[in-house]
Amino acid sequence: MKIYKKKNLILFILIFIGCKSTLNHNPSINDSTDSDVEIEEKVPSPKGLRHFMDGQLLMNQGDFAMAIIEFQEALTLDPNVSAIHTAIAESYWNLGKPKLSEKHLLIAIKNDAKDKQALQMISDQYILEKKFTKATTYLQRLNNLYPNESKYIIALAELKKVNQEYKDAMELYLAAYKLESDRNELLETAGRFALQIKDEEKAKSIFKKLSETDIDQPRYLSIYIDLLSRSGLFQEGIEFIESLNKEYGENSERKAQLAILLYRSGEKVKALTLLELLVKDFSNNPNYYFSLFDIYMDEKQLDKAAILGDKLIANFPEDWRGYYSRSLVFMNEKDNKGVISLLAPVSSTFEKIFSIQYLLGLSNYQIKEYEEAEKFFVNALKISPESKNVLHSMAILYDEIDQFEKSDSIYLKLITIDSNDAQAFNNYAYSLVERGIELEKALELASKAIEIEPNNASYLDTIGWIYYKKNNFKKAQYYIETSLTLNNDNSVVLEHLGDIMMKINKPSDAMNFYRRALSIDKSNQRLKEKVSPE
């Protein structure tokens, strides 16, 4: 529980003597010569000083209880010495008695409002006890007393961070950086807070400055370029990189960022040429591969993306991102078995990598290997316990295998975590209606999903299907037809509308919808039977 360093004994003695020495000037009004001034200097009690020194030695030996006894003896002889109270406070803290420690620190501060050590100690103590408001009070006092010491400003900034006052934290880190302009990490932290509060102008200003002052740190330039890209300021980014190249010469990192800007600004051929050259010339840097891979995927050049993914795996077998990238190509090709054959052999190697475990879960689910899917979803959830994607996937899986108690529990967790999770409200509602239970609750859930996302075709289908189950075919028809205006190639929605048509005695229309559904989902046996009931 120790938080205070054992103090230098000589320093303590000097503090002890200094606190006790006073000058009592009492000249008459008309007297002006120094020789006539009576000076009375009070010196500390020799016996009190001896007790204090003995206490310090005991404290340095870790015998805090005996140290306190010696300090208290010193205190009876010299009751107004702040250093004694500070030493007692440290001893009590190390004995696990924070209240008594606090009491003596407050006395020390009362005796000397500028006692730096006592102010620091009580600030530290309050922070460790999570009494952040009290800690802030004393840190502000320290900052006022010592405005040129950045450590107090940084501590205040961290307390603002704890209270999620990110704007204030940012401003404090900027103030600390102003005092120590050689510490780029302070400016970077301010920039991170600017990103946190979505102050992109401030973030751009900060990361531009960092890119200029630390040209050997590529992440600063990368963040700055991303910020410019979000605002569509591609040309500004290109000109900035060109200015850096003019001053410092070209390097591969800036070329990579330039390629990204060129691509985003529409100069795709130039961007691809530049990145392909970087991959060729700097084959030991995987980051260039990933930038090129992203462009290939974006341009639907899956063959080139696959080749690049294979090169990543061959050249960087210990980098999980290569396997992940190659798997994305398989997924775009709807080759779930390809994903599994690639990732399953390395799943234990990358057991702590969320993306690998999650992709294996998704791919196994798609081929109805539900037990394997559950295993990998559980692995992914261990890595990221609050992942909404995994929770949604697991809920759908449990619905599929009729483990409704588990799926219901997950849906409830999701809507508790986020009351605007429209997907959770919708899927929970659809699960209930498919089971034919709690239709009123299902309607309430579906209505909430529609309230959040009124133009979502799937959610409109869900609420329409609930009305169908409640025999309100007019409302059912309205919602499901509205769903089809938004997405007319969903086989489930087409089948639902066909069922409604049958209920309202429009069998010809029903058959048309069933046939359209079957043309999309050709292997659906239920649809085949509806189209050919005989």
Image: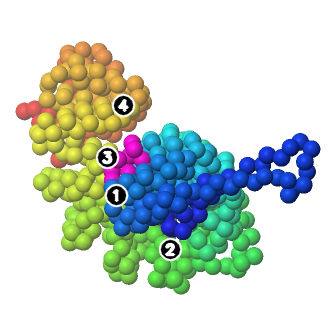
How many tags in the picture?
4
- Quadrant including the N terminus: bottom left
Mark 1 lies on residue = 66
Counting from the top left corner in percent of width and height, residue 227 is at 61, 55
Neighbor class of circle 4 (other Cα within 10 Å; few <14, some 14-19, many 20+) is: few
In front: mark 3 or mark 2?
Answer: 3
Task: Classify mark 1: helix, strand or loop.
Answer: helix
Q: CA distance from mark 2 to mark 4?
A: 40 Å
Farthest bottom residue in view: 281
Q: Earlier in the sequence, mark 3 or mark 2?
A: 2
Mark carried by residue 419: 4
Q: Label 4's element?
A: loop
Question: Which of 79 and 453 lies nearest the eye of the viewer?
Answer: 79
Quarter of image, res 60? bottom left
Residue bearing mark 3:
386
**Separation (CA) of disc 3 from disc 4:** 15 Å
Q: Amino acid at mark 3?
A: Glu
Q: Determine if the magenta segment contains residue 204.
A: no
When the figure is inspected, residue 14 is found, relative to residue 403, above or below; the finding is below
Disc number lying in front (1 or 4): 1
Question: What is the distance, in whole Å, between disc 1 and disc 4 at their CAs?
Answer: 58 Å
Q: Residue at x 68, y 55 (%)?
A: 41
